[in-house]
Image (cartoon, rainbow, N blue to C red):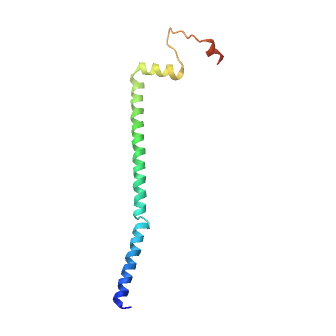
Amino acid sequence: MSRQTLLLNLSILLLAVLLLIIIFGDKGVNDLRELKTERSRLIGINLELERENQRLYREIKRLKTDPAYIENIARRELGMVGKGEVIIRSQKAQKR
């Protein structure tokens, strides 16, 4: 083989090795793809958390300012009754 052919073959081999390193190596194309997927997943989680935070902020504001909302929650979650109200239970409810 001539020297030029040898250099050409070595150059092609070197380029092939570099291409494999770029695609499969550490911080290569595969890692970039995985990082993009992870970033998209984290953005979705972040959006869900922002929505939940807004919902909780609105609920806190209502709990601080809306007596009717507080009364509704007290009745629903704690089983409380208002002044002057009478509770009538059926026999079915008493057996349970």
Q: Residue at x 37, y 79 (%)?
A: 12
58 shown above or below 25: above
Does residue 93 appear to the left or right of 21 in the view shown? right
Image coords of residue 31 (percent x, y)? 42, 61
Q: Quadrant of residue 3?
A: bottom left
For the residue pair 56 and 43, the one nearer the viewer reads as 43
Q: Quadrant where the N terminus lies?
A: bottom left
Does residue 43 appear to the left or right of 74 in the view shown? left
Q: Which residue is drawn at 39% across and 55% down?
A: 36
Image coords of residue 76 (percent x, y)? 50, 21
Residue at the bottom extreme, as displayed: 2
Q: Residue at x 41, y 29 (%)?
A: 59
Image coords of residue 67 (percent x, y)? 42, 19
Q: In which quarter of the image is residue 55?
A: top left
Q: How many labels does the image show?
A: 0
Image coords of residue 20 (percent x, y)? 42, 71
